[in-house]
Amino acid sequence: MQGLHLTADCYGCRCDGALLLDPEQLRRFVVQQTTLSGLTIVGEKFHPFQAADGSAAGVTCALLLAESHLAIHTWPERNAVTLDVYVCNYTSDNSAKASGLLDALIAGFAPSQSQTHRLQRGEGGAGQTLALEQLTPHSAYGTRLSPPLAQMQSPFQRIEIADSAEFGKVMRLDGAFMTSERDEFFYHECLVHPAALAHPQPRRALIIGGGDGGSSEELLKHPSIAHITLCEIDPAVIQLARRHLQQIHRGALDDPRVRHVAQDGFAFVLEAARHPAAEHAYDLILLDLTDPQTPDGSALAADCYTREFLQACHALLADNGALVMHLGSPFHHPQRFGLLRQRLSSVFRQVSPYTVYVPLYGALWGMAVASDTLAPRGLDSGAVASRLRERGLHDLQYYNAEVHPALFALPNFVQNLGA
């Protein structure tokens, strides 16, 4: 009987109204999403209701699955939908398929607000659930999470913060793992310090995304940093991070050197590039973004991976400036890694890809420093050690003088991606 039970209550649904009233249109949508999720339909029932005057009044449907069931009830008078997905995990783990199906259904109904619950049935116990993130259509990685400390549907994404035994507090956006208290330094230190240490004296920085505050916290360790523009499209991420993720940002979100801009990063950068000004000459630009596309097809940050955007970032860099971004997993996302590396090379004279294993992501992760002049690969361990001492960077957990050149030592299969 061990399995995963998911429910969602969706309010203010902005989908086509017929999806809440017409059993045939609802059937096409539900069957398509269930099939795409990889679950197996073995039976179905769609029952329309009528109001006293004979008008349509909602639909109840149930799909019998080889893995268990899906049940939906629409409330057109409230623009609301209730969803219920249960899968058995006795012979194989169907959790990722169930999570993907629930996410796809929620996206299709497009609620302005939603509330989800995850219950591990049978052997799970202790109110925890195995939360899985789909790395590819064929692979997933996850960890057990306690009931959410906070969850909300912002105008941009679903935000969840929950406790875990291994990672401490974990933030997820639209079901994707973003950061955790206990492993954030793997990602944030390696995103920030290779480029920041290579720069002789970084003073001004722009961060696109980064609402958890981790990259800001690492940048502020450099004594020359005088100003950071933190451009985060979703203020709710910052609000929840302030409340729950103090061990990640350590007050950086409220440091007077950090200026908050609640705007789409793509629009902010293109507008700044069209109107050059002294305050838009950045020594470092960090793209601390969600993935360009998730397995369910959503792409909140996709514009910020385009060549047009990278060209605009290039225009905002000061002399000796550099851009840093992540490229995804070279194993799970080799095409993305190679394509982004090629795009960077078409805009910048020097592109230095590197890798770091990120425990929360369950994968080797790719990053790159792109610049016309800055060459972090050229710094040997002695030069890095000297700059670490000069800048008083003693409280790092991952990055050090020996790690710096090792980050840029790429396996052959990674060297060949996009080369």
Image (cartoon, helix red, strand yellow):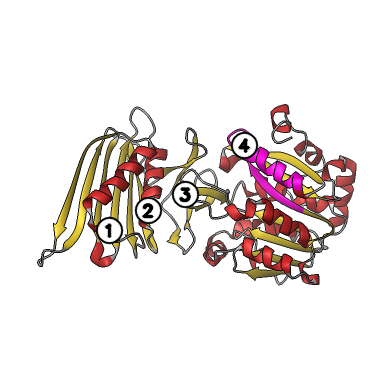
- Tell me residue 336's x, y (percent): 62, 40
Please indicate whether residue 82 sits to the left or right of residue 281 in the image.
Answer: left
Confirm or deny contact between disc 2 and disc 3 (CB under 8 A): no
Q: Quadrant of the N terminus?
A: top left
- Report crowding for label 1: few under 14, some 14 to 19, many 20 or more residues within 10 A (C-alpha): some
Task: Label 2, secondary structure: give it.
Answer: helix
Depth order, front residue of 304/307: 307
**Mark closer to the chain start, 1 or 2:** 1
CA distance for labels 4 and 3: 23 Å
Going by the numbered disc 3, the residue's amino acid type is Gly
Asked if marks 3 and 1 touch (Cβ < 8 Å), the reply is: no
The x and y percentages for residue 236 are: 52, 65
Sequence order check, earlier mark of 3 and 1 = 1
Q: CA distance from mark 2 to mark 3?
A: 16 Å
Instruction: Name the mark nearer the viewer: 4 or 3.
Output: 4
Q: Which residue is mark 1?
A: 18
SS label for mark 3: loop
Asked whether the residues under the numbered discs 4 and 2 touch, taking CB atoms below 8 Å apart as contact, a structural biologist would say: no
**Circle 3 is placed at which residue position?**
175
Which residue is depicted at the point 73% across and 65% down? Answer: 273
User: Of the residues shown, which amino acid type is indicated by label 4?
Assistant: Gln
Q: Which residue is mark 2?
A: 108
For marks 2 and 3, the one nearer the N-term is: 2
Q: What label does residue 335 carry, if any?
A: 4
**Image: magenta residue range:** 323-346
